[in-house]
Amino acid sequence: MSNQRYVLLDRDGVINHDSDAFIKSPDEWLPIEGSLEAIALFTAQGYQVIVVTNQSGVARGLFDEMMLEQIHAKMRRLVSEKGGHIAAIYYCPHGADSPCNCRKPKAGMLKAFGADFNTDLTKIAVIGDSLRDLQAAEKVGAEPILVKTGKGQKTLLNNPQLNFLVFENLYDAAKHITSRHPA
């Protein structure tokens, strides 16, 4: 097992503004205030940042995987301009009714990351804005963290029993995580 530190981030609603109409092009991908700086903070503190995202727009035919790569290229470029780095991106291109193992709340993408990076998932923060992000984290024993951006506020209202760390946004979560275990 490696000694490397990781943090797993959902994409839509955590790093960038979400849309009920889906993010279908690089032009529609707009960072949430402070999210790029949050990734830069993680990077500066020695964390490998991994993005784990459901992208059912591919299955719905709203965009193809080549367009998704272009969206992710923009995200990586903007993160890099702030001094951050995204080590890997895992995405599920399947629809909600798919029998796949990767679509959150299933834990397939998290397990794939664990295998690819030869790391124990139980000490890793998984930051998301929806219940399915938190459920996927729980399934592998990771630490679920909710942000109020994107669908986070609604997730909190609909699930008052949640007993996880909750932050206003990704930057606040990053400040907390990096202060717990400074580089």
Image (cartoon, rainbow, N blue to C red):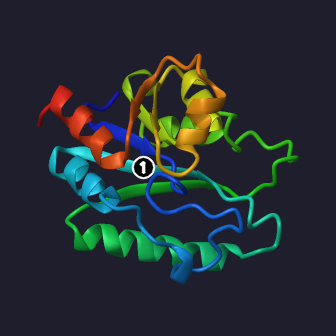
Name the residue located 25 percent from the left edge and 61 percent from the top edge.
84
Name the residue located 43 percent from the left edge and 57 percent from the top edge.
15
Q: In this view, does 85 lie above or below 81?
A: above
Please, which residue is most extreme toward the front here? Answer: 157
Q: Is residue 44 visible?
A: yes
Q: Can residue 136 be seen in this view?
A: no
Q: Is residue 30 above or below residue 136?
A: below
Marks counted in the figure total 1
Q: Which image quadrant for residue 177?
A: top left
Q: In this view, does 33 lie above or below 147?
A: below
Circle 1 is placed at which residue position?
A: 50
Please, which residue is most extreme toward the bottom here? Answer: 27
Task: Give how far across and how far down residue 115 sits, in percent.
Answer: 51, 36
Task: Give how far across and how far down residue 18 sits, in percent.
Answer: 57, 61
Residue type at mark 1 is: Ile
Q: What element carries label 1?
A: strand
Name the residue located 74 percent from the left edge and 67 percent from the top edge.
58
Foreground residue among 174 and 169: 169
Task: Give how far across and how far down residue 122 sits, in percent.
Answer: 43, 21
Q: Is residue 22 left or right of residue 47?
A: right
Please, which residue is most extreme toward the left here? Answer: 183
Image quadrant holding the C terminus, namely: top left
Q: Which image quadrant for residue 180?
A: top left
Task: Give how far across and how far down residue 125 sits, in percent.
Answer: 39, 32
Q: Which image quadrant for residue 123?
A: top left
Image quadrant holding the N terminus, namely: top left
Q: In this view, does 14 lie to the left or right of 139?
A: left
Name the residue located 43 percent from the left edge and 77 percent from the top edge.
74
Q: Is residue 67 above or below residue 89?
A: below
**Crowdedness of circle 1 by 10 Å Cα count: few (<14), some, many (20+)?**
many
Q: In this view, does 5 lie to the left or right of 44?
A: right
